[in-house]
Amino acid sequence: MQNSVLTIKIKQRLNKLDSQDYDNIECWQVVEAFNKAQVEWVRRQLHGINIVKEGDEQSTRRIDDLQVLLNTQPVNLADEVYFYSAPIPENYLQWKRVDTYAKNDCCDQRRMVVYLAEEANVNNLLRDAGKKPSFDWAETFATLKDNRVNIYTNKEFEIQSADLTYYRQPVKIQIQGCVDPYTGVQSTVDVQSEFKDDIIEVIIDEAVSILAGDIESGNQFSRGTETAERNN
């Protein structure tokens, strides 16, 4: 969907398409509200806080709607004796999985199954014979801490490489010629939303709800919120 159409739809829902009063919506407000709305929408779908209570990959619709945000990329590992650590990407939003290849002194490289664990349980997991890192069983665990992913080895094997699969942040839209009041920088390109048009329609209602709340327009706020949820 083109940003010009998106802007018209938002102003139409706010009943400000031809308004000349003090509630005129500027382009940067449209951009800010839409970018905020798409992050809120994505987080709600991933966690299952929506009208049908469906979270990440719990239905074909969720798989289809959110697959555009799934990303896989290799990470740079640093050996920290008992685990290997790597920074998570700047556009990281939510964990999906990490794939690693490991080896030890006696065996060739093999693919490991890595489970995400809680940082609070690390000591217990390292002592548990059934859950601690095992090259023989090709299993280990990882934690997230300080914007890094830590993959534990307990010094039983070496990790050769790791690929992190995660949900990334949605690409922020930009409207060409629009000046961001926070940075004072004018957008030189027109960046459209990466979502399908049917999802954009839902996010538009979410953005309308945000803008309506900002200008204290109760009817538009209620309508935008209810419509966005009803179409999830």
Image (cartoon, rainbow, N blue to C red):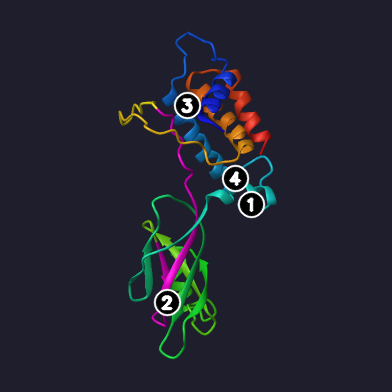
Instruction: Judge whether residue 168 is colored magenta.
Output: yes
Q: CB atoms at circles 4 and 1 under 8 Å apart?
A: no
Q: Nearer the viewer, mark 4 or mark 3?
A: 3
- Would you say 187 lies left or right of 205 here? left
**In the figure, residue 41 lies in which quadrant?**
top right
Question: Which residues fall within the magenta stretch?
Answer: 149-176
| Mark 4 lies on residue | 45
Q: Which of 219 and 88 is in front in this view?
A: 88
For label 3, count other residues whose C-alpha is less than 10 Å away and answer few (under 14), some (14-19) or many (20+): many
Q: Which sits earlier in the primary sequence, circle 4 or circle 2? A: 4
| Mark 2 lies on residue | 153
The residue positioned 56% from the left and 41% from the top of the image is 195
Is 79 above or below relative to 218?
below
Q: Distance between the residues labelled 4 and 3?
A: 22 Å
Q: Where is residue 129 in the image (x, y as percent from the top left)?
A: 51, 81
Q: Where is residue 222 in the image (x, y as percent from the top left)?
A: 61, 24
Instruction: Judge whether residue 51 is colored magenta.
Output: no
Q: Where is residue 2 in the image (x, y as percent from the top left)?
A: 54, 31
Q: How far apart are marks 4 and 2 (CA)?
A: 34 Å
Q: Which of 137 and 190 is in front in this view?
A: 190
**Element at badge 4?**
helix
Q: How far apart are marks 4 and 1 (CA)?
A: 10 Å
**Element at badge 1?**
helix
Q: Which sits earlier in the primary sequence, circle 1 or circle 2? A: 1
User: Mark number for residue 63?
Assistant: 1
Q: Distance between the residues labelled 1 and 3?
A: 28 Å
**Element at badge 2?**
loop
| Mark 3 lies on residue | 30
* Residue type marked 1: Ile
